[in-house]
Image: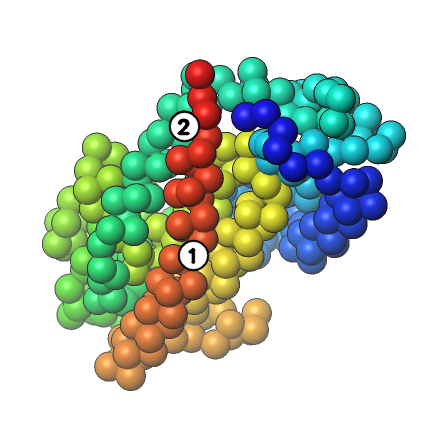
Amino acid sequence: MTAVEVLTEPDWLAREAAHVSRMREWTVPHQERRSRGEKHPVLDFLFTYYSYRPSHLERWQPGPGVALAGPAARRFLDRKGYVPTADGVVLDPAGFTENKARTAEFVLGLLSATASRAPRLSCFGLHEWAMVYREPADSVRHNQVPLRLGSAGTDEVVEALDIRCGHFDAFRFFTSPARPRNELAPTRETQVALEQPGCLHANMDLFKWAYKLDPFVPAELVADCFELAVEIRTLDMRASPYDLAALGYPPVRIETAAGRAEYARRQAEFARRSEPLRHRLIAHCDRLVSAAP
């Protein structure tokens, strides 16, 4: 992972400033809400379920194979994992530990397997409904907002439609009565075998796989995955049983045929948009694994 590209100081400073400005559109409102003790049922997920800190999301990094020229680059030496060279400051290849290498190998295998499959578009976002099925009202995860159809109406939708969730990290939050209703029984061990590119959560997780390899992924790739995850999360919750209209999220009424058709169209669109990001991550992981000692 030796440096192959030298960025002049004006070039990398401009990239850094653009990245910080781009990410602060999301991090600043989140931090302001948190300071007020205010929950957001749609956007908090991107900072709580996903464990990348807002300060880390704002932080620009060039990734491996890039030298940062100029005296300003010396501040990167205050971060863990950067070293000076004749070309400029670079990521220390020694920071790509065995644990990082194993993560890169897992991500490479998972994303390659996912990319090899055709998208399935018949789940209709019922995972969110299965997470509240027969749940007492005070135990519902987002109990600060009402259920559009009430508890009984929500349960009726779950009982009327087939649940086809193959994403383990969604399935593990199903209520106990909902689990037997799922056509699949995903586990962590079957994750690579089951994930497919039509799944909203698999596509949101591109953000997770990018930041898991921090700082060995360029900040711009992490940001691209994050911004797509924001959009996908919006559809995820618009199709959920929650009434979020007052927050500016009109429902996708998957309890109707028209709503299910709309969901499938949007799901297919996100599958298409996720594809180039998935392939960028696959190529990046392949380079990391190939260059590892």
Q: Residue at image x 33%, y 44%?
A: 111
Q: Residue at image x 64%, y 25%?
A: 91
Q: Is residue 287 above or below residue 23?
A: above
Query: Which amino acid type corresponds to the residue marked 1 in the rendered image?
Result: Pro
Closest to the observer, 197 or 71: 71
Q: Quadrant of the C terminus?
A: top left
Residue at numbered disc 2? 290
Query: In the rendering, at what x and y percent does residue 153 appear?
Result: 27, 71
Residue 202 is tagged as: none
Residue 102 visible in image: yes
Could you say which quadrant of the image residue 243 lies in?
bottom left
Query: Which amino acid type corresponds to the residue marked 2 in the rendered image?
Result: Ser
Query: In the rendering, at what x and y percent does residue 150 appear?
Result: 34, 69
Q: Is residue 204 above or below residue 153?
A: above
Q: Residues within 10 Å of mark 2 (few under 14, many from 20)?
A: few
Could you say which quadrant of the image residue 265 lies in?
bottom left
Q: Are marks 1 and 2 in contact (CB under 8 Å)?
A: no
Q: Residue at image x 50%, y 58%?
A: 228
Q: Is residue 58 above or below residue 66?
A: below
Residue at numbered disc 1? 276
Closest to the observer, 173 or 100: 100
User: Could you say whether the residue bearing mark 2 is in a helix, strand or loop?
Assistant: helix
Measured in 3D between alpha carbons, the distance from the residue under mark 1 to the one under mark 2, in whole angstroms, is: 21 Å
Q: Quadrant of the N terminus?
A: top right
Closest to the observer, 145 or 30: 30
Closest to the observer, 129 or 259: 259
Q: How many marks?
A: 2
